[in-house]
């Protein structure tokens, strides 16, 4: 009896999670489709830098110099993301 209750609860939770993920993916597609070409390229660049940073930190050895290099790349990524976000906000206000 308890097994069937937990199974139905788990199935319900998984179905809700799948609906939420599908909704989130649809919103992301609509957001990217609403951007102009320059904004799409900036977003693509941010995604590429983020993926590069994740791969770089994953593949790094545990030497101190390489850890510092990974932190430096992370700081550059954050600064670029802030600058891109600020640029988008400014361009919206002037357009």
Image (tube, grey):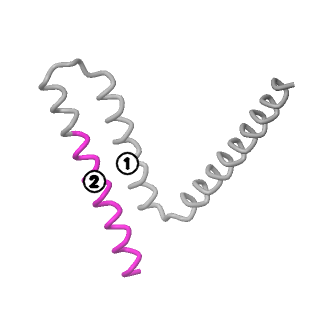
**Along the line of sight, the residue nearer the viewer: 19 or 50:** 19
Q: Position of residue 14 (x, y in %)?
A: 72, 37
Q: Is residue 21 left or right of residue 51?
A: right
Q: Closest to the observer: 54 or 4?
A: 4
- Residue span colored magenta: 73-95
Q: Secondary structure at mark 2?
A: helix
Question: For the residue labelled by badge 1, is the local secondary structure a helix, a strand or a loop?
Answer: helix
As drawn, the residue found furthest toward the bottom would be: 94
Q: Nearer the viewer, mark 1 or mark 2?
A: 2
Question: What crowding class fits label 1: few (fewer than 14 Cα within 10 Å), some (14-19), or many (20 or more)?
Answer: some
Residue under pointer 2: 80
Asked if the residues shown at circle 1 and circle 2 are in contact, with their CB atoms under 8 angstroms apart, the answer is yes
Q: Please name the predominant secondary structure of the magenta segment in the image.
A: helix
Relative height, residue 45 to residue 63 (above, below): below
Q: Quadrant of residue 54?
A: top left
Q: Is residue 24 left or right of residue 86?
A: right
From mark 1 to mark 2, how far is it between C-alphas? 10 Å
- Check the image and name the residue furthest to the left: 65
The quarter of the rendered structure image containing the N terminus is top right
**Residue 45, which numbered label?**
1
The x and y percentages for residue 44 are: 43, 49
Report the residue at 17% width, 32% height from top. Answer: 69
Is residue 88 shown in magenta?
yes
Counting residues from the start of the chain, the first of labels 1 and 2 encountered is 1
Give the x, y percent position of residue 30: 61, 60
- The disc label shown at residue 33, or none: none
Q: Residue 39: where, in percent of width, then height?
A: 43, 61
């Amino acid at each position: 009896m308890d097994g069937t209750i937990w199974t139905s609860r788990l199935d319900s939770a998984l179905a809700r999670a799948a609906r939420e993920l599908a909704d989130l993916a649809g919103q992301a597609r609509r957001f990217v489709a609403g951007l102009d070409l320059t904004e799409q390229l900036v977003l693509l660049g941010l995604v590429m830098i983020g993926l590069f940073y994740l791969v770089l930190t994953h593949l790094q050895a545990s030497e101190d110099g390489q850890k510092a290099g990974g932190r430096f790349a992370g700081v550059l990524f954050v600064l670029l993301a802030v600058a891109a976000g600020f640029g988008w906000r400014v361009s919206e206000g002037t357009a």
